[in-house]
Image (cartoon, coloured by chain):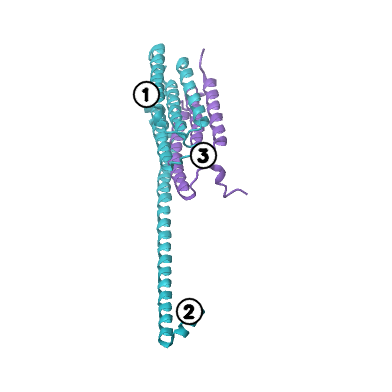
Chain colours: A cyan, B purple
Amino acid sequence: MTVNAVGYYAFAAVAVLSALGVVGLRSLHRAALCLAGFGAGVGLLFLVLGNELLFAAEVLVYGLAVPALVLLALELVDARGRDDVREASFTRWWPAGLAAACGLGALLLGVMAVSGNAWVQGSPQGDGSVTRQMGELIFKTYALPFATSAVLLLTALVGAVLTARRDDLEDELEAAEQARRHREERMRRRREDRERARRSQRPAAVGAGAGDQGEEAE
Amino acid sequence: MDVGLTHFVGLSAVLFAIGAFGLLSRRNLLGVLMSAQVMLGGAAVALAAFARFGYKGTHPLSGAAFAFLVIVAGCAEVAVAIALLLLLHRRRDTLHVDELDDLRG
């Protein structure tokens, strides 16, 4: 029961270097791209371990979905000028991205050439695919944890929606409160203007001297 | 050069330690979140390795099933955490952990 040593060392190096990039790079954009590399490295390690289902899940979730979400959040936050969020537009670095993609592709092809496509050296039980066995395991033996994770996902979804929605409601309440204050202020000013006009009219009818006194008193 | 369980568990420990360092040293909340994902990835590697080199008496793929659940939990965590972080940024205009010290005693 052995695994491919070349594949292990190559993908472990990719995973460790990417993890160091995630925690060490000042630019969060680059760190998110390193997170994609980390997901790919760990996913390929799962493939070395002979588990295709985990490989697919890891690459789809940690290699694509999570970095995409983080990059989207970084664009929405748009904290320009903050030292650890954005140093420069990372689109300027497309030659480096192209070089990294070519390098990783060459690494992949090299490992395939060395190992002769024998990354997966037999499944643990020997018969049947790992995906089918894991499907049976998850839906029979571990049905309860799986159902719990489904509840967790649903709770996460509802929580995310409610969090955003409550903020909208609070914004609306705040806007309504501001409009009410504005209306009251306008009514108060109009009342004062009317009062002032009435005062200035009354002294004009009585005499100019009384009007001056009234204005002084005011 | 035989690669065994020890190699994978060692790698898992290294990845977990790197993630923990990032969790403590990053000052931006999005960086903290990504470091937590590195820690979860390290744990998943250990679980999958135990599934491959597991002991007799347990189902060979039990660890892999739990690794799958770890991936699902991490996915849910990211979805909720990013919604919360965006909301926090809209209210406080910062994601810097040193400036978010409302609960500091």
Numbered circle sitting on residue B28: 3
What is the CA distance from the residue labelled 2 to the residue labelled 3?
61 Å
Numbered circle sitting on residue A41: none
Task: Report if residue A196 is visible in the image.
Answer: yes
Q: Residue at x 53, y 31 (%)?
A: B19
Q: Is residue A22 above or below residue B81?
A: above
Q: Are marks 2 and 3 on the same chain?
A: no
Task: Report if residue A57 is visible in the image.
Answer: no
Q: Chain of mark 2?
A: A
Q: Position of residue A105 (x, y in %)?
A: 38, 19
Q: Residue at x 47, y 50 (%)?
A: B91
Q: Are marks 1 and 3 on the same chain?
A: no
Q: Chain of mark 3?
A: B
Q: Secondary structure at mark 2?
A: helix
Tell me which numbered mark, 2 or 1, is placed earlier along the sequence.
1
Q: Residue at x 42, y 71 (%)?
A: A189
Front position among marks 1 and 3: 3
Amino acid type indicated by mark 1? Ser
Q: Label 1: which residue?
A: A129
Front position among marks 2 and 1: 2
What is the CA distance from the residue labelled 2 to the residue labelled 1?
97 Å
Q: Are marks 2 and 1 in contact (CB under 8 Å)?
A: no
What is the CA distance from the residue labelled 1 to the residue labelled 3?
43 Å
Q: Label 2: which residue?
A: A215
Q: Is residue A33 above or below residue B99?
A: above
Q: Position of residue B66 (x, y in %)?
A: 47, 32
Label 2 crowd (10 A; few <14 / some 14-19 / many >=20): few
Residue placed most toward the observer, A215 or B90:
A215
Amino acid type indicated by mark 2? Glu
Amino acid type indicated by mark 3? Asn
